[in-house]
Amino acid sequence: MDNFSEVLTLFLSVDNFLAIAAGVLIGVVVGAIPGLTATMAVALALPFTFSMEPVTAILLLVGIYKGGMYGGSITAILIRTPGSPASACTLLDGYPMAQQGHAKKALKTALYSSVVADLISNIALIFFAAYLAKIALNFGPPEYFWLICFSLTIIVSVSGNSAIKGLIAAGLGIIISTIGLDAVYGTQRLTFDNYNLMDRVSFIPLLIGLFAIPEVIDFYTSKVAPHIRTAVSGASLTWKEFKGSLKTVIRGSVIGVIIGAIPGTGATSAAFISYSEAKRTSPRKANFGKGEVEGVAAAEAGNNGVAGATLIPLLSLGIPGDVITAIILGAFMIHGLTPGPVLFQENLPLVYALFCGILVSSFVLVFVGNAAIRYFSLIADIPKTILLPIVLMFCIYGAYAVNNSTFDIGLMLAFGILGFVFNRTGVAAAPFLIGFILGPMFEDNLRRTLLISKGDPTIFFRGPIAWVFITLTVASLVFAFRRYWVSRKEQQAEA
Amino acid sequence: MMSSKIGFRLKRSALCVVTAVSMACGGVAQADEWPDDNIRLVVPYSAGGTTDLLSRKVADLLQRELTTVVVENRPGAGSTVATGQLARGGRGSDHMLLMASPGHTIGASLYPNLRYDPVADFAFIRNVINIPNVMVVPGNSPYNTVAEFVEAARAKQLSFSSPGIGSSVHMSGELFKNLTQTQLIHVPFRGSGEALPALLAGDVDVAFENMPTVYPHIQSGKLKALAVTTPQESEFLPDVPSMQQAGAGYGLENYETSAWFGLIAHKSFPEAGLEKLESALAKIMSGEDFQNFLPQFGAVAGEEVGDDFRTMVDNEVAKWSEVAEQANLKR
């Protein structure tokens, strides 16, 4: 009872509620601006939290994190420019929806999927943290290796019409990802002695270039009507429509939670896995990539499911799963707190006060998100002749801002041209992106596993987690080939 | 005609002299008034890392003493992109500082064709913070002392993890390997967040991690600390010997590594600026705020000022260059 009242005293303060609201708002706005990521916002907000109460400080940072995760989807849907890496998957269906005049529906789908996923993720954090943390600890390099293998099979489902073109794009993505210093020996790979390439190709310039720039080039090279209203005033999301996607949202959230609880895998992978699963099981799979509500729901559920779950290894083990949680770990330390089992023993009321705040943040996201939709969606009504130069300016600024590097602007433009070529040749950009993200993880974990076992390959089959992912990989490949075979037969029959 | 030409030349020379003198005076005036602009503190790593976190705290304290300090993150190629830009100097370099760390000295060995000299091209202001590394093994590891570990590593191949190639954690391991004549296998991860679970689960045998990363796990018993890498024991782990003590007789008598964080500037940084920064740093570092901040990172205040700091960096460059060469890292 004493603990309970202490939790309430710690949690029920005006400061906490203000911190959550401010955090989510900052996160949504920053997340929506290409190149400004939630990571940056959290890092910049950190010094302001030095003087706050620990609970208030951490809730502010968590608020930014969660808001940023949703905010990224706004510009992905409206102008095909993912505000954050994790929302790259959202644009696959979100942007086509906007083009068809359903921007509002897409934005609302993204918002409510995010909120539901966030809530499920928070509940997992509160009730299953200890259990999930145990799984995370059993996830060594061999288990990662199989998880990445399974994730790579999703290339097939995001390849658009041609699996071959998808594989080519993925291969190209993997090649680009090898640029930089070799992780084990420090050898230079494809850097041509250029310093800017030694830390690998930066992700944000690649992302912005690949998706946003082709739209700009397309507009100026093709003679389309200069004023296309994407009509945000169009129909909103109905409960019936959302109910139809609810199963997908819940599945995506669970995928997000599992991926989030394992350090180092990330929200982008979760979004793509969730999307691929939704497409596989959906009765409307042919509509995926052309503006399917379920596609937006799956992607957003996947990446927001990660947000609460990354706090699981942080709070229960003291291990940050990504850069943002690493900064939050710093915030804990500055306030003299040490995340991990000791935190639960010594500061239990504080942990529960944090949980209360994190739960509240999901609901705050509904209000802030709705307000953001109202104002941001005005973007969609701006004539393209005015909007696209502004988008281009933001792209350049965004590419520069990540590393304060002008080289990255050139990189972004180069990937813009590549994206344009992809568009014109019917190659999907998503497999390229997946290859770029997962390629290094595949290589790193393969090499790590063999280093740990001193070259003995039996380590790849060392335990139940490995076998689960081996089975999933094989099943996913069999399913993909079967579908490919059936569709070819159908095509031949039609011919 | 001639005289008018001479007159013109004289006038021009006089103008040049006046301009030069006024510029020089301007320079003196500027130096006296330093800082007459905002100070830029460049962090050569991404926002959110340890260097960034410490830099923001130092910037916050420094601006209470001097003027507004703007923190700028400029990551790339270890820390060599930002450091190279500082070395080139140019406009604004008289108000630009950089938070250097082991990456400054290790990067000089690891990255080829550096266009700067990590010692000669900079002014060294002060080493601000030192964080020891700790040699840790999993809680259920059979090794309880450095001696036991070295004996085992000589008999069979063991592995050590690091958050990435060229990090102080990695190089601490390479140095250990060299001095003890063992064949430890380096297993690199991307960041401590990935490296730590592998150590906790026993997938790797040892790590030479930064104190704040492993401290909670040592406390909870999930990791065992065998030694700290500084010459003295750490007040945070009073029962853990230093590597020099624990590894005596195994080649580790001179073993010393730590993650240090210090301020450097362009070599032609105004003298008045150096003096003002030194005294401002001395003041904030003895202040309560800074002293309370240190324990949260298991850190101690850095001691080396000016030339002492330069000598320290010079020695580090030599040490890591040798280690990198022996580990076959120099490309």
Image (tube, rainbow, N blue to C red):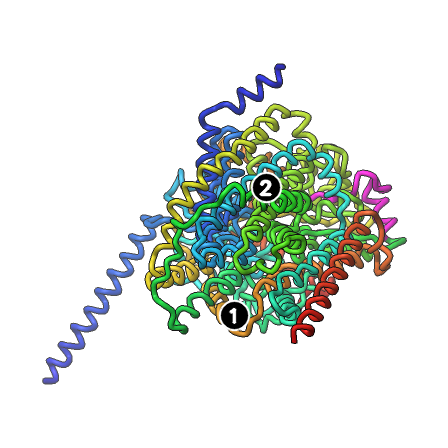
Residue B158 versus residue A168 in the image, above or below: above
> Residue beneath label 2, please?
A117
Q: Position of residue B323 (x, y in %)?
A: 70, 60
Q: Residue at x 82, y 55 (%)?
A: A460
Both on one chain, marks 1 and 2?
yes
Region in magenta: B126-153
Q: Residue furthest right?
A: B155
> A240 or B85: nearer the eye?
A240
> B15 or B157: nearer the eye?
B157
Horizontal arrangement in the rendering, residue B35 relative to residue B132 (left or right): left
Residue A69 versus residue A175 in the image, above or below: above
Residue type, mark 1 in image: Asn
Asked where in the image residue B196 lies, by quadrant, the reply is top right
Name the disc covering residue A190, or none: none
Which chain's residue wears label 2?
A: A
Of helix, strand and loop, which one carries label 1?
helix
**Quick one: label 2, few (<14), some, or many (20+) residues within 10 Å?**
many
- Can residue B128 be seen in the rendering of this structure? no
> Residue beneath label 1, please?
A423
Q: Position of residue B201 (x, y in %)?
A: 78, 44
Q: Residue at x 34, y 63 (%)?
A: A227
Q: Position of residue A428 (x, y in %)?
A: 57, 66
